[in-house]
Amino acid sequence: MACNCAGSVGCDCVIIAGTGMSVSGLGTSGDPYVVTNGYPPVGVTDTPSLDLTLAANSISGKVRLAPLLSVQDTGEVDLTLNGAGTEASPFVLSAALPGITLSPSNTGQVLMKKPDGSWGPGDATSAPIGAVQTANGLFGDGSAGSPVRIRAKTYAEWESVVDAAAF
């Protein structure tokens, strides 16, 4: 021993306990010093969203987002969440729109309501002649040959356009 203790008589060495520690015994072979840690042992407890690991007085953790995420459908949107939320299996959120068909479609078609109430691609149409009433700086009837246009040059003319823009 560093303080040259020998025999069974005892030792003149002094061991002082620090915070959270205790020392017992006389330092003899029959009653050796015993140093005890007064702090409770550290442990970890996992949760569904956190995976903890204790190794060599170090705590690390991995967050699991999957138990925390969910999607809720509505009448307009059907959502699906796939994947585990890891680098190997990232989350993928997709959505479908029930009652809406987007294909087959052709260039120039627009989304329109069909006679059966569903929505899908259809040919673009213009408003029939006379469908839009204009005045005070708004011109045109909304048809392909006469689209609605604004002709206002002064602030007063712009004010009258805003007043006239009631559809």
Image: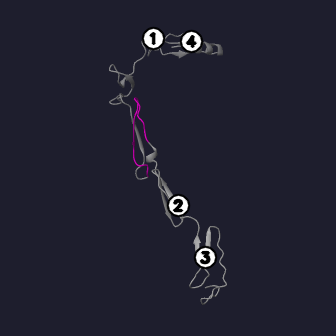
* Residue identifier under label 3: 24
Q: Tell me which numbered mark, 3 or 1, is placed earlier along the sequence.
A: 3
Residue kind at label 2, given as amino acid type:
Ile
Dot 2, how many residues are within 10 Å of its Cα: few (below 14), some (14-19), or many (20+)?
few
Report the mark closest to the observer, 1 or 2: 2
14 above or below 165? Answer: below
Q: Position of residue 120 (x, y in %)?
A: 36, 26
* Residue identifier under label 2: 59
The residue tagged with tag 3: helix, strand or loop? Answer: strand
* Residue identifier under label 1: 131
Q: What span is in magenta?
A: 70-86
Checking the image for residue 115, the label placed there is: none
The residue tagged with tag 2: helix, strand or loop? Answer: strand
Q: Tell me which numbered mark, 4 or 1, is placed earlier along the sequence.
A: 1
Report the mark closest to the observer, 2 or 3: 3
Checking the image for residue 164, the label placed there is: 4
Q: Is residue 81 magenta?
A: yes
Q: Residue at x 56, y 84 (%)?
A: 30
Residue kind at label 4, given as amino acid type:
Ala
